[in-house]
Image (cartoon, helix red, strand yellow):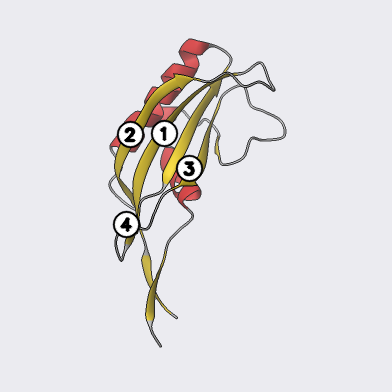
Amino acid sequence: MAEGVQFPDAELAVCNLLRNPLLGGLPVVADIPATRPNEFVRVIRTGGPRETLRSEAPILAIEAWAQKKARAVEIANQARAVLGAADGLVFGVKELAGPAYLPDPQSTQIRYTFTIQARIRGQGVTV
């Protein structure tokens, strides 16, 4: 038998990290809910490589949704603060693109999005 490394679901790991008191209990999801909350955060993995034997570096888009621009920016900045302090399963977060207004063509909700590259620790497994 050999040893391999298994990585956790990066979207789930970052969603769990963002379920932080700073964000006031907002829903943090990987998929837009069928019934949209007035405010929520969405995490989408868009790529990223394995970095070392035991870590990978996923690229993730973080979306902050709200009814008003100022609130969407506030949510995005709160998420940036939480991610910038990450030092556990998720660590070494680097911002690749700061918050940008990106209107959703299918709804009237305001959306700001930013892109990060995180580092995520894998776990040794016997294969």
Q: Residue at x 39, y 54 (%)?
A: 49
Badge 4 amino acid: Glu
Residue that label 1 marks: 115
Q: Residue at x 52, y 30 (%)?
A: 26
Q: Secondary structure at mark 4?
A: loop
Q: Earlier in the sequence, mark 2 or mark 3?
A: 3
- Local packing at callout 2 (Cα closer than 10 Å; few below 14, some 14-19, many 20+) is some
Q: Earlier in the sequence, mark 4 or mark 1?
A: 4
- Local packing at callout 3 (Cα closer than 10 Å; few below 14, some 14-19, many 20+) is many
Badge 2 amino acid: Glu
Q: Position of residue 29 (x, y in %)?
A: 56, 39
Drawn side of residue 24 relative to residue 3, left or right: right
Residue that label 3 marks: 15
Q: Earlier in the sequence, mark 1 or mark 3?
A: 3
Q: Residue furthest bottom?
A: 1
Of tags 2 and 3, which is closer to the observer?
A: 2
Of tags 1 and 3, which is closer to the observer?
A: 1
- Local packing at callout 4 (Cα closer than 10 Å; few below 14, some 14-19, many 20+) is few
Q: Which mark is residue 51?
A: 4
> Could you give the CA–CA distance between mark 1 and mark 3, rounded to whole angstroms?
14 Å
> Could you give the CA–CA distance between mark 4 and mark 1, rounded to whole angstroms?
18 Å
Drawn side of residue 121 relative to residue 36, left or right: left
Residues at marks 2 and 3 touching, judged by CB atoms closer than 8 Å? no
Q: Secondary structure at mark 3?
A: helix
Q: Position of residue 7 (x, y in %)?
A: 42, 61
